[in-house]
Image (cartoon, rainbow, N blue to C red):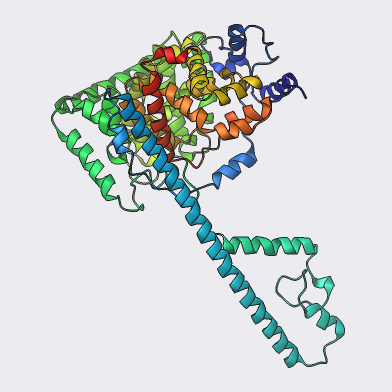
Amino acid sequence: MSSDGNKKQFWKRNAAKVPGSIQHVYGAQHPPFDPLLHANLIKAGNKPPPATPGKPKKATTFQEFESITSDAWDVGDDDDELLAMAAQNLNIEVVMETANKVIENHSKQQEKQRQDDTTELDRREDDTREEVAEDDEDNEEEEEEDRVEEGDATSPEVSFASQSSPYTDGRLVKSHSEAPIGSPKDAAGERAGLHRQRSLPHRPPVIPLVARMADQNTSGTPAMTEREASRLDKFKQLLAGPNTDLEELRKLSWSGIPRQVRPIAWKLLSGYLPANAERRESVLQRKRQEYFGFIQQYYDSRNEEHHQDTYRQIHIDIPRTNPLIPLFQQASVQEIFERILFIWAIRHPASGYVQGINDLVTPFFVVFVFEYIEEEVENFDVSSLEEEALRNIEADSFWCMSKLLDGIQDNYTFAQPGIQKKVKALEELVSRIDESVHRHMQHYEVEYLQFAFRWMNNLLMRELPLRCTIRLWDTYQAEPEGFSHFHLYVCAAFLVRWRKEILEERDFQGLMILLQNLPTMHWGNEEVSVLLAEAYRLKFAFADAPNHYKR
């Protein structure tokens, strides 16, 4: 089938999976930005595909595979050298050398882990073969003893059935009519499965989508390492002063923020709280009261005719927000999200509500819930919190999300010019850092807007588990223009991270399915730290040298 045929078939099938109208997909306030149409306007001569691309529904089998995928988890000790330099204007050679060191050390750790796993697997298989051989000898001895005790008076039929048979499950049967229905192949498969189960190392528990144990020092997790305890002390000392040094806080936060101090660190880094400690409580009270004043003033208008479309779109999108995490399926949590998004849309008429903004509430909500609980948040029942705590979480989430969106609002205004500009910059950047990947996608007519639009619109939240997003946002809030400018380099590093898988795909459809279903479910702090290190290196190589974009 030709490339055009593949594209038509792909978009036709996936567009059908998107319920409702175009407005349903992109939001209620303004017409949608069509990535395909715009891509073809920019690049004249390409025939536009016949249908607007819908976001393909992930295959159940892929989700099931990802849900049981886990790996060893060790936070690297070698990233502080690089990350402490984030806010400094350093010599490019020093930065490149340090970034390379982080990535090289990570590769060595991964290779050593693979060798250790292979050695352990071989040892277990040898032990299992010895155990199976011993079991077979014991079974033969027991059967021989049984035959001696019963004597030779046993009928031929019974003797035959009592011998080892592929139909039996370890018990004696008098005839084949009592054997379970099946084939020798089925029974052999069961034995092979049992052998594999006994020989493989024990699989650790399924990784929570919100946080791994190694990401969060919660109750029931291993004690903090000396390094982690030292970093936590540095944060506490910095935050305990009468005036927090925000520049120093950014340097510390770039390499990740401990869970215990993340709520106040995020509020300070986002500009929601002042650096002066004495003023913080009064500012919190005033801003929380102001938010609930908006609720009283505007929320009842959601049923008015000119706001119905906005509220209906929000009401549709909320249940789709992190559908695999039980926390976000609770009615009280969904009501909180509806109020936050509706009030923000009313107060920002230039953009209104656009699909994708709903995702941006979730990291703030989770982080601020951790301010009141110590247990795992994924299955936490928020109704057990006091009403005042829930109100505080809601108001704080609203204001911090608003601060974030103030810096990227052109992503959500009419025709979404901010996203168009960033996707074009991403294409130019990738063409310079990995020409093979760029030409491969050009060859199969994959436009960057067809996959990177979502990366910019949702800040990679649909591509990464929530625990990774929270770690990523530690750095974004510490980095100047993290959510707008630095995010571009993270996206470039993220794309090139999958170069091997991309180059193995040999048609349009395969590439699109890969790029919309990248296997990151097992990712955690270590993978995100390596991604950030590579993005940091790209930023220093290209951010202050715009001519590098040009050919």
Q: Residue furthest front?
A: 93
183 over 74 or under it: above or below: below
Drawn side of residue 223 relative to residue 39, left or right: left
65 over 45 or under it: above or below: below
x and y percent of residue 532 in the render? 40, 31
Q: Residue furthest right?
A: 156
Q: Is residue 203 visible?
A: no
Q: Is residue 351 visible?
A: yes
Front-most of residues 516 and 314:
516
x and y percent of residue 319 in the render? 53, 30
Drawn side of residue 382 relative to residue 323, left or right: left
Drawn side of residue 4 relative to residue 230, left or right: right
* Quadrant the N terminus occupies: top right
Q: Residue at x 46, y 46 (%)?
A: 110
Q: Residue at x 32, y 34 (%)?
A: 82
x and y percent of residue 223 in the render? 31, 53
Drawn side of residue 129 relative to residue 407, left or right: right
Q: Residue at x 50, y 60 (%)?
A: 120
Number of marks in picture: 0
Q: Residue at x 43, y 15 (%)?
A: 548
162 over 336 or under it: above or below: below
Q: Dividing the picture into quarters, in which one does residue 506 lie?
A: top right
Front-most of residues 34 and 128:
128
Front-most of residues 420 and 59:
420
x and y percent of residue 60 in the render? 63, 39
Q: Dividing the picture into quarters, in which one does residue 336 lie?
A: top left
Q: Dividing the picture into quarters, in which one does residue 9 lie?
A: top right
